[in-house]
Amino acid sequence: MRSLIKYHIKFMAGISLVCLFAACNDFLDREPLSQITPDAYLNEESQLAAYAVNLYPGMFVSGLDFFQSDNHTDNMASSYGYDNRYVPGEWKTGQTGGSWSFSTIYSCNYFLERVLPVWNAGKISGNTENINHYVGEMYFLRAFEYFKKYQEFGDFPIIRQVLLDQRDPLLEASKRYPRNEVARFIISDLDSAIMLLKPVSPDGKNLRVSAYVAQLVKSRVALFEATWLKYFKNTPFVPNGPGWPGKEKDYNASYQFPSGSIESEIDYFLTEAMAAAQAVADYVPLVENNGILQQSEADAANPYYDIYCAVDLSGFAEVLLWRQYNKGLGITHNITVGMQEAGFGAGLTRGMVDGFLMANGLPIYDPSSGYAGDDYISDVRKERDGRLRLFLKEPYQINVIWPSPEGTHATPVELIPTITHSDPIRRYSTGYAIRKGASFNGDQGGNGTNFTGVPIFRAAEAYLNYMEACYEKNGTLDAKARGYWTALRNRARMDADFDKTIAATDMNREKVNDWGVYSAGQEIDVTLYNIRRERRCELMAEGLRYMDLRRWRAMDQIVTTPYHIEGFKLWGPIKDWYNTGADGSSILIYGLDNDRSNVSSPERSMYLRPYEILSKSLVLDGYKWTMAHYLSPIAIQNFLNTTEDNDPTRSPIYQNPGWPLTANQGAADL
């Protein structure tokens, strides 16, 4: 209870700060700042706009984090080390902290509670369409914040209003709704947003969401819940599943699915996902990929490459929302500085690289594929899916075409991967470095004024969401799904005949390096796998992989069979790159008991294993999983805040499956 009171008080104290943001518009026509109060606020268009945009910071993953947020999956690995979620027992329930928080939700609720009555009465001054857009924006922001909470915790309180500072209302508000009800609430908010938002926001795509963004997120939410319910059916992770902790609370004890059954609920969400995805994919085209990776001023620009590194992304139709960076705005980043070198320690895994097909549509292991092998990175890139050729770096490629005196931190020519560097920022974690996000403009390698924009939402995801939802719902692909898939393959500059790919796919080969082969510990069918493969390749390094792995329940198999993160083939001809000692000797040092070791031993694998260099590594024997880790634990203080006798079992909140009600303990096996 005290945690909710705390957010209530903090929120009211912060209203005056929001007023300050609004005051920059029409300053001379406004009351003195000291006299602005909540009662005199949110009565006209610019105030609504200012309030909404003040909630954007931190709402979306952006900046360098955007291109690194696939770290700690089977796609990418970090030179800063492994994540404890792959070490059962090391991820522990906290006493305090975590994301069980409501401040942004309170801010959204305050706006809606304050504005809706005035808006419905027609008493807000300004452009009607813009006012509608800003109201829709708040529905979207509340939905997106809820989506983040729901991904992490599943069941979650649904709070629609600013709460009174009273015990009973706050206790009631602490009750967790079943996860599918939270998903329905999110979709309801997104439906409201879709009705009110413009196709393009009044302030452009670099600042605010649009109706297309809301449709895309709706498809993402619906697909998430549909696949979660399907693959976690008959477990404690879904309402009414055996051992579902919500059943222990009287307010959820008699819960029934609104559609009548879990199967009907799955079908409902898949239907919603298809409709929302189609609303974007039918109207927003993909950006062209001309296949060119610029290496000189004479080379034509590639629009597909540039959606990740242009300064201004407003002209790319596929980009539905992007973030602008500019020194004058006080918002900068070091994306290109990192991507021109080691990606700030984030590298692609062997599994990610091997998952890309050949340009002829065949897997690399097919005898007719023409695969050149992986002795060198140049061989790996030959005749591959155009996305790999664009976004996997190769030594001696040109990184800077347009030099600049401001590019003081630029790396003009791609390095031999510095896999032994002592500084993790400059260490290539896997040997495979990503180029996505790297500009060829030297200004971006230093202290320039205009920095590259970052795409937050792309229409390509809608194509992928429709394909997957269609197949999950119907067991086959309809004409639209086939058309979307063809468009993605054509844009990747590879053979568009995905049926040929499906026929050539060997699941025994694929499961070695792709967790997406599995759901609930079982191999999925070959068509669904290739839909997932397409998604993996198109959305590489865009922060959606861990989300997908969780909703697919794609990590059960590493509960019993550990997975080894690997990079490039170090112990082949590539090892000679590192004969750079003073006498021409190798700088590679290995051996688990040698505290000077800087690479993994060839006895462990021919491929670099970045987390298996020293004996003290807790993932020396590979990544492992425990079922509880599909959801996050709720910190113990939240239980104590909602009970009078410090007995967490008497709180209206319940802990997630497998997690204890005692701080500093790991999850139990399920």
Image: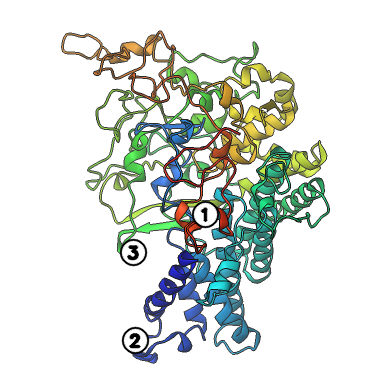
Marks 3 and 2 sit apart, C-alpha to C-alpha, by 23 Å
Q: Is residue 32 left or right of residue 390?
A: left
Q: Residue 216, relative to residue 560: is it above or below? A: below
Q: Secondary structure at mark 3?
A: helix
Q: Residue 448, relative to residue 195: is it above or below? A: above
Mark 3 and mark 2 lie on one chain; the one further toward the N terminus is 2
> Residue 33 shows which numbered tag?
2
Q: Secondary structure at mark 1?
A: helix
- Circle 2 or circle 1, nearest the eye: 1
- Circle 3 or circle 1, nearest the eye: 1
Question: Mark 1, residues whose alpha carbon is within 10 Å: few (<14), some, or many (≥20)?
Answer: many
Q: Is residue 216 left or right of residue 615?
A: right
Residue type, mark 1 in image: Pro
Residue type, mark 3 in image: Leu
Q: Residue 379, relative to residue 353: is it above or below? A: above
- Residue 239 in percent (x, y) is at 71, 49
The residue sitting at 51% across, 47% down in the picture is 661
Q: Which residue is mark 3?
A: 329
Q: Quadrant of the C terminus?
A: top right
Question: Mark 2, residues whose alpha carbon is within 10 Å: few (<14), some, or many (≥20)?
Answer: few
Q: Which residue is mark 1?
A: 648
Marks 3 and 1 sit apart, C-alpha to C-alpha, by 46 Å
Q: Nearer the viewer, residue 625 or 387?
A: 625
Marks 2 and 1 sit apart, C-alpha to C-alpha, by 45 Å
Q: Is residue 89 left or right of residue 551?
A: left
Q: Are marks 3 and 1 in contact (CB under 8 Å)?
A: no
Question: Mark 3, residues whose alpha carbon is within 10 Å: few (<14), some, or many (≥20)?
Answer: few
Task: Write down the quadrant of residue 137 in the picture.
Answer: bottom right
